[in-house]
Image (cartoon, coloured by chain):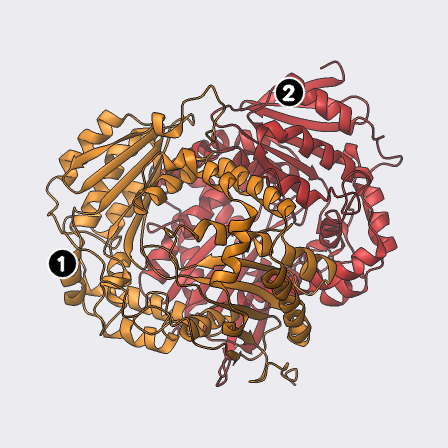
Chain colours: A red, B orange
């Protein structure tokens, strides 16, 4: 414990800092099952990329499984083999603001997972031959995504809404950048961002705090903090001066409407009312979208969600149309619902329902060690892990007036981006 | 040996099991999580009980359960559940109607009451069926452009005949069946197939069994007894002498192809050889460190995902073994060749003692990890119940995995898999020979 500074506690989770290098550690013991989850969150995502190396964060994430000094195929101890042989469920994900690596495993193997994550934090190989073979793997991941009309629509929504800010490009990147990025660039990216002072180690589940801190100190403590400060993203999005629209025409069978509005950063105080608004619009059978679009048979599904990212967000509604429903009808219904909320507000009952759902979701997130770690991961990405532990209290404080206010403030036509996916007939030829 | 530490009671010791009414079995397991209760349950009434002239009846009947009851409409029920963040879900699989729920402890009596009401007294309103049909037809139409779904359909039709539960009808045929359904059809199916008899309900989490039992008895005792058993499959089992075939399904403007290869194996999951075949298949393609991902993805970089598994082997069905992967259209031929190279090596040489030892600990360890949440535990218990096994199997399953030896595992590969019977299907922007289509101009 003497290697760490205890920083703060919230919601049963305690934050420590490893004094030697600035590594952040979050711990929550929970002993209902002999399982623990380890997660390492790096505060780097596709927002840290630029033209020419979009998708680099994600490609680097793949290369982090290709071996490090102590864990590699040549010595018979590849990361996958060592961890999967003891029954660990492991993987990694990359998104706009963060990259995370996680292992959910029988708790007697926790130290092994800590040792692996510490080793690849600074000793990953990142070899050119590995990049070459992994590039085509990632390209197939891109291709699989492109098979899905929804993914194509979502990429274009962000690319149209954000023109200067790096949220413009999706995390998987543009195809030509996936193919063309140099290994040296990935190495430079790794050396810049994969440092203890840019990472948070989270452990949830069945473990002993003293022992686990000792393991973290022993394995992660050997790395120095980055010699230079972590670079800041300084690009801000210019003001949008009118509505934007686009259409994607592609072989397909059913139409989709996406309607996005600019929304504030993840830690902005308006975010909680926007989250409640999203639930009132798209959460369950009682929601306004379900009643107007789904129950009427105009759509197979409809959703609304405010993306809680670090710099900016988008409040996006998606409507998956049934075959005979024209796009303009689906779009008009969304806009009518927005207008009604802006004019007349929402009911106290609708807001209370959203609060009830959040209360339950918080309890559900304690069911198994992975759910807590996953929720913390997203809060870390927005800039403050306690954003997860204080979520219920903040949502409980939201009023109907605040929901109407954010609907008026953010759901403005001039800040909107609308996309239609129009299926072209003949998507399936005779086989 | 159990999945818990030696000093802990076994799962079986912590479970409570008994009938709350004739033909209604309740299994409960208190777990450490606070306030959360998970329910998983099922009973016979799935697709195999649909009449041959319309196989969509079972599915649509289950899909209508949450669309209102005789005493409350769907919005009233939705409001009661959503006000407290609870959810009840229904679906129908080959043999069973499945239901699941999650709620806070204090809301369990209300959830049980609504669950009973929805299962016993669905309204089957015409307007709700009309709306549901539109959505189901819309989703089916989307599947016409799904490379994954089109590959699965073609693969199932090459392995099985139309009367086998593993056969997936074409999308157009599924759409026609949905279009033809009436509320009277659904009500009659419900009357004939829904009731006590084969129902099992598993509840895990922060719960009091006595209280739950009382609630269930009050609600469910009035449900009529319906004794139905699945029809025999004996006349419809896959023909294991049919030689291998290939089929390429063309879809326009798709950047990734789904490849499926495999064959029927003629045994179900209760067969003594089943576990050995599962483990052998796991060594070939069960996870990231298995052979297919190590070679075709990690070394050759040909795919984002490739694996192998056994499917369609529950409830006495003769199942199938399959390899599934995705490839860019220009890389399909290379990917297919690389996959077949690994398959031939596996079929010819079998697996090694080291591989077997490693995958045994993978399977037993991940089983332990899967039991750490109320949902994972409820699912595992229900699975054991549906298989007709003793609940002690929850504790002894890892022992059975550990007991497998190399001779058993390699023996089943040759016994159930024959390279000459290999069926190969690919769906995507490829022509009828599997060659990539020219890019759209």
Q: Residue at x 15, y 51 (%)?
A: B121
- Chain for mark 1? B
Q: Total number of numbered labels?
A: 2
From this view, report whether residue B162 is shown above or below residue B74: below
Protein chain holding label 2: A
Q: Residue A8 carries which label?
A: 2
Q: Do labels 2 and 1 share a chain?
A: no
Q: Quadrant of residue A112?
A: top right
- The residue under the point 38% across, 52% down is B271
Q: Residue furthest top?
A: A2
Secondary structure under tag 1 reads helix
Could you tell me which residue is drawn at 27 percent across and 66 percent down? B234
The residue under the point 52% across, 59% down is B413
Which one is in front in this view, the residue at disc 2 or the one at disc 1? Answer: 1
Quadrant the C terminus of chain B occupies? bottom right
**Residue A39 sits in which quadrant?**
top right
Q: Which of B17 and A266 is in front in this view?
A: B17
- The residue closer to the viewer here, B426 or A428, is B426
Q: Is A364 left or right of B61, judged from the image as shown? A: right
Q: Tell me, for residue B192, which label it has, or none.
A: 1
Can residue B435 be spotted in the picture? yes
Between the C-alphas of marks 2 and 1, the distance is 61 Å
């Amino acid at each position: 414990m003497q290697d760490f500074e205890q920083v703060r506690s919230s919601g049963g989770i305690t934050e420590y800092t490893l004094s030697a290098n600035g590594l952040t550690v979050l711990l929550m013991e929970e002993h209902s099952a002999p399982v623990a989850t380890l997660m390492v969150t790096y505060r780097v995502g596709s927002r840290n990329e630029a033209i020419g190396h979009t998708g680099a964060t994600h490609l680097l994430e793949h290369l982090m499984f290709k071996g490090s000094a102590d864990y590699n195929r040549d010595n018979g101890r590849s990361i996958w083999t060592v961890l999967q042989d003891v029954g660990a469920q492991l993987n990694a994900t990359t998104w706009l603001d963060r990259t995370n690596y996680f292992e959910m495993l029988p708790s007697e193997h926790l130290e092994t997972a800590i040792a692996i994550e510490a080793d690849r934090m600074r000793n990953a190989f990142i070899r050119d031959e590995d990049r070459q073979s992994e590039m085509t793997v990632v390209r197939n991941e891109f291709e699989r995504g492109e098979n899905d009309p929804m993914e194509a629509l979502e990429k274009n929504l962000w690319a149209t809404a954000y023109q200067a800010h790096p949220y413009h490009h999706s995390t998987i990147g543009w195809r030509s950048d996936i193919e063309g990025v140099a290994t040296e660039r990935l190495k430079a990216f790794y050396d810049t961002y994969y440092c203890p002072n840019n990472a948070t180690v989270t452990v949830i589940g069945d473990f002993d705090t003293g022992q686990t801190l000792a393991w973290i100190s022993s394995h992660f403590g050997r790395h120095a903090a980055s010699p230079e400060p972590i670079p800041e993203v300084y690009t801000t999005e210019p003001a949008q001066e009118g509505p934007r629209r686009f259409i994607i025409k592609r072989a397909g069978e059913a139409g989709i409407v996406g309607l996005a509005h600019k929304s504030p950063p993840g830690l902005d105080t308006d975010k909680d009312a926007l989250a409640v608004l999203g639930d009132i619009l798209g959460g369950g059978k009682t929601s306004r979208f379900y009643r107007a679009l789904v129950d009427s048979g105009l759509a197979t599904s409809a959703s609304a969600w405010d993306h809680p990212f670090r710099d900016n967000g988008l409040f996006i509604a998606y409507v998956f149309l049934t075959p005979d429903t024209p796009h303009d009808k689906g779009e008009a219904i969304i806009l009518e619902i927005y207008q009604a909320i802006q004019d007349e507000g929402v009911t106290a009952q609708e807001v209370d329902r959203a609060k009830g759902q959040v209360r339950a979701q918080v309890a559900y997130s304690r069911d198994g060690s992975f759910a807590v770690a996953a929720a913390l991961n997203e809060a870390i990405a927005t800039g403050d892990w306690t954003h997860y532990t204080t979520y219920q209290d903040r949502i409980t404080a939201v009023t109907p007036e605040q929901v109407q206010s954010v609907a008026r403030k953010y759901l403005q036509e001039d800040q909107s981006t609308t996309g239609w996916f129009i299926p072209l007939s003949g998507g399936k030829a005779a086989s | 040996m159990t999945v818990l530490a030696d000093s802990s009671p076994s799962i079986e010791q912590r479970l409570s099991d008994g009938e709350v009414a004739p033909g209604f079995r309740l299994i409960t397991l208190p777990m450490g999580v606070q306030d959360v209760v998970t329910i998983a349950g099922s009973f016979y009434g799935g697709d195999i009980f649909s009449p041959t002239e319309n196989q969509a009846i079972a599915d649509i009947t289950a899909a209508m359960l949450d669309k209102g009851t005789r005493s409350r409409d769907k919005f009233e029920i939705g409001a009661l559940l959503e006000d407290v963040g609870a959810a009840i879900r229904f679906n129908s699989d080959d043999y069973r109607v499945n239901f699941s729920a999650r709620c806070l402890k204090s809301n369990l009596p209300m959830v049980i009451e609504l669950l009973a009401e929805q299962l016993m007294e669905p309204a089957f309103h015409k307007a709700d069926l009309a709306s549901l049909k539109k959505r189901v037809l819309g989703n089916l139409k989307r599947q016409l452009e799904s490379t994954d779904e089109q590959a699965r359909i073609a693969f199932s039709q090459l392995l099985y005949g139309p009367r086998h539960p593993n056969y997936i009808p074409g999308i157009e045929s599924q759409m026609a069946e949905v279009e033809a359904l009436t509320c009277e059809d659904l009500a009659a199916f419900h009357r004939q197939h829904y009731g006590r008899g084969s129902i099992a309900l598993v509840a895990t989490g922060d719960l009091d069994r006595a209280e739950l039992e009382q609630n269930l008895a009050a609600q469910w005792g009035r449900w009529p007894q319906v004794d139905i058993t699945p029809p025999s499959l004996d006349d419809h089992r896959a023909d294991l002498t049919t030689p291998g075939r290939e089929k390429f399904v063309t879809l326009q403007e798709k950047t990734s192809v789904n490849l499926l290869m495999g064959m029927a194996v003629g045994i179900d999951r209760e067969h003594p050889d089943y576990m050995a075949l599962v483990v052998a298949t796991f060594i070939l393609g069960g996870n990231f460190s298995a052979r297919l991902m190590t070679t075709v993805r990690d070394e050759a970089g040909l795919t984002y995902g490739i694996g192998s598994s056994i499917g369609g082997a529950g409830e006495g069905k003769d199942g199938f073994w399959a390899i599934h992967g995705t490839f860019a259209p220009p890389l399909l031929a290379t990917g297919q060749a690389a996959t077949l190279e690994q398959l031939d090596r596996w079929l010819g040489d079998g697996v090694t003692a080291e591989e077997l030892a490693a995958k045994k600990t993978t399977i037993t360890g991940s089983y332990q990890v899967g039991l750490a949440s109320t949902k994972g535990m409820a699912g595992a218990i229900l699975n054991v119940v549906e298989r007709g096994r003793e609940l002690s199997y929850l504790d002894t399953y890892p022992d059975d995995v550990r007991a497998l030896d190399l001779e058993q595992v390699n023996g089943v590969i040759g016994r159930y898999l024959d390279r000459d019977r290999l069926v190969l299907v690919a769906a995507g922007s490829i022509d009828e020979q599997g060659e990539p289509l020219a890019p759209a101009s």
